[in-house]
């Protein structure tokens, strides 16, 4: 195998997936930035969740909002609901794996907060119940998913947004989630603080 050729092919594939994903979700990213910005301006916070590898992206989004993305600005209130391993483990022990996210949302998230949920390819009961619990509490959801987890989008209410990236395997989808998350952070900063230029 020619490794240089293999690398070039893989890079070209990644660029193509990124290009198609960003074009496919640009309107949804803009809408999500407005939704999140409005929530923050009303005194709400951003709560994030992700399963498996998506957990790190959810934690990363919360960190970028609390600190900064690309410019100096005040921190924005955000929390990753699965960042605290002790609390998460206690919730699993108390409520069962299936109801853990619902319990955390009921305890820590309330209007005008917003929930950002990442699902690379997993439509577990946890993901479904997180959306249902947020909807029952009147909390909008920004759902990052893909064609591998399309049924989750059908659970969203009117004031929620689905950002469905391109990708056929988990690692591709998570790469696209990361790239679109960076764009979302930039758009949120513009929404709240204006254009930096």
Image (cartoon, helix red, strand yellow):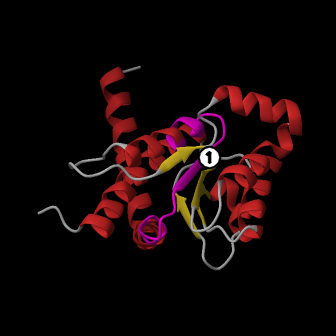
Q: Is residue 146 magenta?
A: no
Q: Secondary structure at mark 1?
A: strand
Q: Nearer the viewer, residue 144 or 100?
A: 100
Q: Nearer the viewer, residue 143 or 136?
A: 136
Instruction: Place residue 187 in its image quadrant.
Output: bottom left
Horizontal and vertical percent for residue 118? 59, 50
Q: Is residue 183 above or below residue 30?
A: above
Horizontal and vertical percent for residue 141? 61, 64
Horizontal and vertical percent for residue 27? 42, 73
Q: Can residue 57 be seen at all in this image of the molecule?
A: yes
Instruction: Place residue 138 in its image quadrant.
Output: bottom right
Q: Is residue 144 above or below residue 54?
A: below
The residue depicted at 61 percent of the width and 68 percent of the height is 140
The residue depicted at 79 percent of the width and 48 percent of the height is 103
Instruction: Place residue 195 in its image quadrant.
Output: bottom left
**Mark 1, residue position:** 49
The residue depicted at 46 percent of the width and 49 percent of the height is 176
Q: Crowdedness of circle 1 by 10 Å Cα count: few (<14), some, many (20+)?
A: many
Q: Is residue 47 magenta?
A: yes
**Quarter of the figure that contains the C terminus:** bottom left
87 left or right, relative to 67: right
The residue furthest front is: 43
- Stretch in magenta: 37-58
The residue furthest left is: 197
The residue depicted at 47 percent of the width and 45 percent of the height is 62
Q: Is residue 29 above or below residue 124?
A: below
115 left or right, relative to 188: right
Q: Can residue 124 be seen at all in this image of the molecule?
A: no
Q: Nearer the viewer, residue 156 or 107?
A: 107
């Amino acid at each position: 195998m020619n490794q240089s050729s293999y690398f070039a092919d893989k890079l070209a594939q990644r660029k193509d997936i990124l290009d198609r994903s960003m074009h496919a979700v640009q309107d949804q990213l803009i809408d999500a930035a407005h939704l999140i910005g409005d929530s923050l301006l009303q005194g709400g916070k951003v709560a994030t969740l992700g399963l498996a590898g998506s957990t790190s992206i959810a934690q990363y989004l919360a960190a970028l909002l609390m600190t900064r993305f690309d410019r100096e600005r005040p921190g924005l209130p955000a929390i990753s609901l699965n960042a605290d391993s002790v609390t998460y483990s206690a919730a699993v022990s108390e409520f069962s794996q299936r109801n853990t996210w619902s319990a955390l949302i009921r305890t820590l998230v309330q209007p005008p907060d917003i929930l950002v949920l990442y699902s690379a390819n997993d439509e577990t009961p946890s993901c479904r119940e997180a959306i249902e619990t947020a909807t029952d509490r009147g909390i909008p959801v920004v759902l990052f998913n893909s064609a591998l987890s399309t049924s989750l989008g059908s659970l969203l209410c009117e004031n929620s947004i689905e950002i469905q990236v391109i990708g056929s395997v988990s690692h591709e989808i998570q790469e696209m989630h990361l790239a679109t998350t960076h764009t979302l952070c930039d758009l949120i900063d513009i929404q709240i603080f204006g254009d930096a230029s």
